[in-house]
């Protein structure tokens, strides 16, 4: 039953992400898109940028890195008693060896994170989150900036469609 709920939640999340990407009102400005080249943090903090990066990671089968990063970010907002339950969920999903979305952590980071699970503070996953952010920034983020997804968006924001008003059309007619 839990597996079904998890799959259903993932399906809903993916469809929501795809719907988010297709909403024209959310298309970022050229300045926003260019800021993503300057800073990985800008990309992660921008709603559309994050959704586009997630779509890119899905093509590389490494979406779990972003999901882990987001789960850690959300974890910081939890208070007890929810914090302990959320810490265990993050551990089981992303940190446990053989977990369904296991991320690539070195042994030292994995062990220091595991040591915090039973009595977690809001920064319990900070070290692991920074490690995964570093991996994404050095690897998949660099490929994302060269990807068709990003380049096509950059092109679309470079040449905004300008609609001519009826007055402009009439005045330009000779």
Image (tube, grey):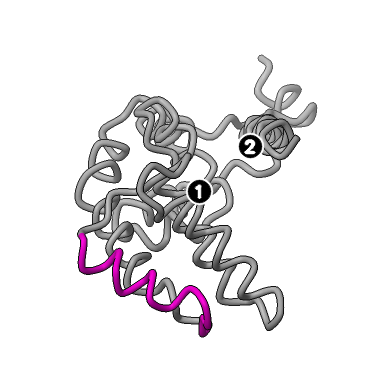
> SS of the residue at dot 2?
helix
Q: Upstream in the sequence, badge 1 or badge 2?
A: 2
Residue in the image at 70% along x and 42% along y? 25
Quadrant into which the C terminus falls: top right
Q: Nearer the viewer, residue 145 or 11?
A: 11
Q: Nearer the viewer, residue 55 or 43?
A: 55
- Please state if 123 lies on the left or on the right of 134 as rendered: right
Q: Is residue 115 magenta?
A: yes
Q: Give how far across and how far down residue 4 sits, in percent.
A: 72, 31
- Note whether 8 is above or below 53 in the view shown: above
Local packing at callout 1 (Cα closer than 10 Å; few below 14, some 14-19, many 20+) is many
Quadrant into which the N terminus falls: top right
Residue 114, quarter of the rendered image: bottom left
Say the numbered circle drawn on residue 50: 1
Q: Give how far across and how far down residue 157 sits, in percent.
A: 48, 38
Residue in the image at 43% along x and 48% along y? 33
Local packing at callout 2 (Cα closer than 10 Å; few below 14, some 14-19, many 20+) is some
**Cα gap from disc 1 to disc 2, whole angstroms:** 9 Å
- Note whether 121 is above or below 84 in the view shown: below
* Residue furthest to the top: 174
Q: Give how far across and how far down residue 73 sits, in percent.
A: 52, 67
**CB of mark 1 within 8 Å of CB of mark 2?**
no
Q: Nearer the viewer, residue 169 or 87?
A: 87
Say the numbered circle drawn on residue 17: 2
Q: Nearer the viewer, residue 142 or 37?
A: 142
Q: Is residue 13 magenta?
A: no
Say the numbered circle drawn on residue 155: none
Q: Give how far across and how far down residue 93 sits, in percent.
A: 50, 49
Q: Which residues are magenta?
A: 107-121
Residue 128, quarter of the rendered image: bottom left
């Amino acid at each position: 039953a839990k597996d079904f709920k998890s799959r259903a939640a993932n399906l809903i999340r993916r469809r929501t992400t795809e719907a988010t990407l297709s909403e024209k009102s959310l298309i970022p400005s050229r300045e926003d898109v260019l800021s993503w080249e300057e800073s990985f943090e800008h990309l992660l903090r921008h709603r559309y940028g994050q959704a586009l990066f997630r779509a890119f990671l899905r093509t590389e089968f490494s979406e779990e890195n972003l999901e882990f990063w987001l789960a850690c970010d959300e974890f910081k907002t939890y208070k007890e008693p929810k914090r302990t339950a959320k810490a265990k969920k993050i551990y089981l999903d992303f940190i446990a060896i053989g977990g369904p979305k296991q991320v690539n952590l070195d042994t030292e980071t994995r062990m220091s994170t595991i040591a915090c699970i039973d009595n977690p503070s809001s920064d319990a996953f900070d070290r692991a989150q920074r490690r995964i952010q570093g991996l994404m920034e050095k690897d998949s983020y660099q490929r994302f900036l060269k990807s068709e997804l990003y380049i096509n968006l950059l092109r679309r924001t470079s040449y905004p469609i300008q609609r001519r008003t009826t007055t402009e059309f009439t005045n330009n007619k000779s």
